[in-house]
């Protein structure tokens, strides 16, 4: 999840620079349209695609693992909050010793 936010910030910074420098070269009435379209194409759409890939990659961890039913598991980041590690379908950081049921 942090990777999606990181690249979103990088793309936003680059787009701000590009829009800033393009302001003098594009007619004002077209500049806003170009800015809105480029925000969607360069920032929003890639973030949506990255998030869908993130969900697809972690689908099994989020549904079929011991961690997915543990109170120390943060599903939004696919992270064990107790060990500060990312569980996978084949790796449980605590080996099940610290598992505690969700409410
Ligand atoms: S405490 Fe153990 S079972 Fe619970 S989320 Fe962390 S690694 Fe998974």
Image (cartoon, rainbow, N blue to C red):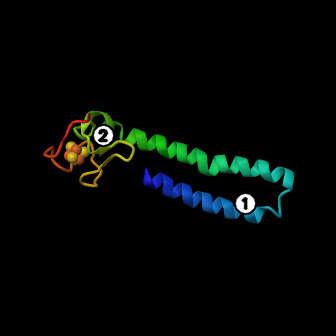
Q: Is residue 103 above or below residue 25?
A: above
List the residue tagged with mark 2. Answer: 61
Q: Please identify the quadrant where the C terminus is shown.
A: top left
> Left or right: 37 with respect to 47?
right
- In this orientation, which residue lies closer to the viewer: 74 or 6? 74
Q: Residue at x 31, y 33 (%)?
A: 63
Marks 2 and 1, how far apart in space?
Answer: 40 Å
Q: Is residue 49 above or below residue 7?
A: above
- In this orientation, which residue lies closer to the viewer: 53 or 77? 77
Instruction: Determine which of the numbered discs, if any, sits on residue 66 in the image.
Output: none
- On the image, the x and y values in percent for residue 44 come to 60, 46
- On the image, the x and y values in percent for residue 54 come to 42, 44
- On the image, the x and y values in percent for residue 95 come to 15, 47
- In this orientation, which residue lies closer to the viewer: 25 or 101? 101
Q: Is residue 91 visible?
A: no
> Left or right: 46 with respect to 84?
right
- On the image, the x and y values in percent for residue 78 come to 34, 46
> Circle 1 sits in a helix, a strand or a loop, which is it?
helix
Q: Residue at x 45, y 42 (%)?
A: 53
Q: Residue at x 48, y 44 (%)?
A: 51
List the residue tagged with mark 1. Answer: 19
Q: Earlier in the sequence, mark 2 or mark 1?
A: 1
User: Can you tell me which quadrant of the image ligand 1 is in?
Assistant: top left
């Amino acid at each position: 999840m942090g990777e999606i936010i990181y690249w979103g910030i990088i793309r936003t910074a680059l787009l701000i620079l590009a829009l800033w420098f393009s302001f003098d070269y594009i007619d004002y009435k077209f500049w806003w349209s170009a800015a809105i379209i480029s925000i969607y194409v360069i920032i929003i759409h890639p973030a949506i695609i990255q998030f869908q890939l993130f969900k697809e990659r972690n689908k099994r961890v989020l549904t079929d693992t011991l961690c997915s039913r543990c109170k120390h598991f943060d599903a939004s980041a696919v992270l064990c909050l107790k060990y500060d590690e990312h569980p996978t379908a084949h790796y449980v950081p605590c080996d099940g010793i610290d598992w505690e049921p969700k409410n």
